[in-house]
Image (cartoon, rainbow, N blue to C red):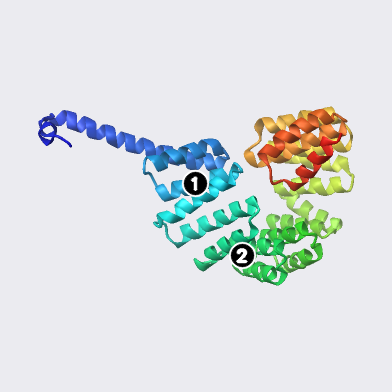
């Protein structure tokens, strides 16, 4: 029990020093929480996880910290732990409806990744009850497709479009159907997207992507070229993809080089150049470009670069190295079904 007489006897100057010290500690802890948020955005998930755990221990933004911890765990493919973190965040019962809806959707994502589709859909319904947004309906539709609930999925996707009728939303829905080998159903949404007006450089880029997915390369090139000529980097990258699909390596390489001249995201440019190298069977150059990309890549680009590196080793018949790198890749990205199939192939080489 505290001795009040001793406290009262402490000189005022010392009390002020102690108070400032504790205030400084509090500020330092809050700064650490902000650092964890930045780490999460930048893809430094281990560091983010550690920071959020410290925030929980120090009673700093506890419910938000639990959510942050769950997101970091989700990104680290630790799904069971992620779900427990999200459940703890929800149990705090301090966040508003938007916060709770957000956490339910993250929990649904973790359940989806762990293979529990039915429970993931139930979590989506919990989010919907709090006021569904477009992302909620998009995820619900995807889950319903996996459960072969096709009419429900179509309704969820229509609800998503009512909330967000952007080109990206239509493409996301198309790709959801594509993953189920239901491209005809998906193309119906792409056709809806093309009805929209708009001719700025981003619109042209989006329409070009849609034409490409529909197999109309001529229209895709026309739209993407309009966008690329306006200096839109994403259009340059996608135009390179279109040219490669037509085995026009010269024009593809020119587009990737033009993109790199913008210095927007050099890792994506190096990845594109490596694809051109592979098309020309120049595998040493491909590996060199991939390594340059990996040296500077942000988190979002690393996966594709690593996968393409494995492809190069396969093409050079170095199956031992390809297998070793695939094992490391699967540890990082266990949800990549295509990689899992490729690994089975490599195990028998």
Taking the spot 66% from the left edge, 70% from the top edge, the residue there is 158
On the picture, is 48 further left or further right than 260?
left
Q: Of marks 1 and 2, which one's residue comes earlier in the chain? A: 1
Question: Residue at point 70% right, 63% down?
Answer: 147
Residue 234 can be seen, yes or no: yes
Q: Tell me where residue 215 sits by quadrant.
A: bottom right
Q: Position of residue 279 (x, y in %)?
A: 87, 38
The residue tagged 2 is: 137
Please give left or right for residue 283 compared with residue 141 in the image.
Answer: right
Q: Locate the N terminus and report the quarter of the image it occupies.
A: top left
Q: Secondary structure at mark 2?
A: helix
Residue designated by label 1: 68
Seen from the viewer's position, the closer of residues 66 and 162 is 66
Q: Residue at x 65, y 42 (%)?
A: 300
Q: Nearer the viewer, residue 142 or 266?
A: 142
Q: Are marks 1 and 2 in contact (CB under 8 Å)?
A: no
Task: Say which residue appears at 10% left-offset and 30% top-offset.
Answer: 9
- Label 1 packing within 10 angstroms: few (<14), some (14-19), many (20+): many
Placement of 54 over or under 145, stated as above or below: above
Circle 2 residues within 10 Å: few <14, some 14–19, many ≥20: many
SS category of the residue bearing label 1: helix
Q: Is residue 278 above or below residue 228?
A: above
Question: Would you identify the image quadrant in which residue 332 lies?
Answer: top right
């Amino acid at each position: 029990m505290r001795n009040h007489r001793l406290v009262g006897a402490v000189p005022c100057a010392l009390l002020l020093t102690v108070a400032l010290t504790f205030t400084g500690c509090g500020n330092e802890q809050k700064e650490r929480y902000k650092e964890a948020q930045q780490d999460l955005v930048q893809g430094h998930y281990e560091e983010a996880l550690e920071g959020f755990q410290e925030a929980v221990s120090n009673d700093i933004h506890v419910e938000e910290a639990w959510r942050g911890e769950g997101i970091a765990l989700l990104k680290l493919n630790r799904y069971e732990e992620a779900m427990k973190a999200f459940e703890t965040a929800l149990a705090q019962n301090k966040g508003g409806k938007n916060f709770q809806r957000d956490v339910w959707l993250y929990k649904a994502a973790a359940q989806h990744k762990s293979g529990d589709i039915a429970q993931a859909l139930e979590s989506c319904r919990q989010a919907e009850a709090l006021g569904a947004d477009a992302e909620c309906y998009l995820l619900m539709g995807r889950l319903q497709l996996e459960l072969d609930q096709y009419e429900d999925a179509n309704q969820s996707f229509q609800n998503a479009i009512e909330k967000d009728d952007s080109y990206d939303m239509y493409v996301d829905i198309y790709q959801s159907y594509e993953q189920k080998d239901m491209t005809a159903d998906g193309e119906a949404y792409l056709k809806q997207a093309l009805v929209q007006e708009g001719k700025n450089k981003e619109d042209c880029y989006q329409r070009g992507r849609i034409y490409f997915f529909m197999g109309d390369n001529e229209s895709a090139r026309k739209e993407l070229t309009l966008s690329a000529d306006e200096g839109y980097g994403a259009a340059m990258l996608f135009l390179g993809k279109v040219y490669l699909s037509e085995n026009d390596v010269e024009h593809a390489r020119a587009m990737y080089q033009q993109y790199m001249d913008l210095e927007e995201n050099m890792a994506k440019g190096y990845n594109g150049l490596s694809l051109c190298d592979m098309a020309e069977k120049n595998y040493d150059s491909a590996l060199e470009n991939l390594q340059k990309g990996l040296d500077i890549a942000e988190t979002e680009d690393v996966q594709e670069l690593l996968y393409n590196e494995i492809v190069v080793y396969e093409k050079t018949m170095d199956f031992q190295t390809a297998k070793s790198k695939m094992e490391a890749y699967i540890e990082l990205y266990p949800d990549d079904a295509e990689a899992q199939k490729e690994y089975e192939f490599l195990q028998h080489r």
